[in-house]
Amino acid sequence: MPAIRLSDIVPFQPEQIYQLVADVRRYPEFLPWCTQARVSNEQASQFTAEMVVNFKGFRESFRTIDRLYPHSRIEVRLHSGPFEKLENEWRFTSVQGGTRVDFFIDFQFKSRLLNMTLGPVFAHASQTMLEAFRKRAFVVYAPTRGQI
């Protein structure tokens, strides 16, 4: 499967966007296909995240190891689940007027059938996810401001 790279600029500080992405426990509140999220093995610079997703009839759980680089980036690596490979990175860079959010994901399912059926829609799902974080930032940090 091809890697997906997306960018967005949001009118908030890198620290704020970093906090939204690092707060995995709240994902079910705003990510449409995330039904459960738990965090364990918390340390200063990393934690284990377990998520249950329900996407296009595909319901699975997976675990990741999330490494934290405060206010600048978050690296996510597969621990277990339906993926053969899952690498994800978020970068937060201060720019005039806010933060540039760079999102990268590279994945491959263990199942050939899942690769064929769900692989192609992951680009759209990734864009939807980035938009969900954008909307969440406005809800959390600017509840009285209109979206741009």
Image (spheres, rainbow, N blue to C red):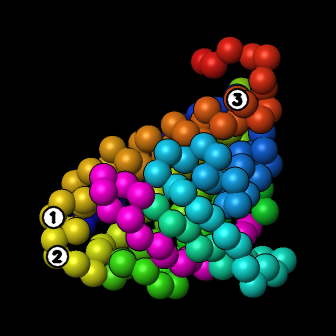
Whether residue 57 is in magenta: the answer is yes
**Residue at position x 62%, y 64% from top?**
37
Identify the residue position indicated by label 1 in the image. Answer: 116
Mark 2 in CB contact with mark 1 (< 8 angstroms) = yes
Q: Which mark is residue 112?
A: 2
Q: In the rendered image of this protein, does residue 145 appear above or below residue 50?
A: above
Three-letter residue code for mark 3 = Phe
Residue type indicated by callout 1: Met
- Dominant SS type (magenta): strand
Residue 95 visible, this angle: no
Amino acid type, label 2 = Arg
The spot of residue 39 in percent (x, y) is 70, 73
Pick the quarter of the image with the C terminus: top right
Q: Does residue 116 show up?
A: yes
Residue 48 vs 127, above or below: the answer is below
Rate crowding at label 3 as few (under 14), some (14 to 19) or many (20 or more) other CA atoms within 10 Å: some
The vertical placement of 88 against 31, above or below, is below
Which circle's residue, 3 or 2, is located before the other in the chain?
2
In the rendered image, which quarter is residue 60 located in?
bottom left
* Segment tinted magenta in the rendering: 54-69
CA distance separating discs 3 and 2: 38 Å
The local crowd at label 1, few if under 14, some if 14 to 19, many if 20 or more residues have their Cα within 10 Å, is: few
Residue 59 position within the rendered picture, expressed as x and y whole percent measured from the top left: 38, 65
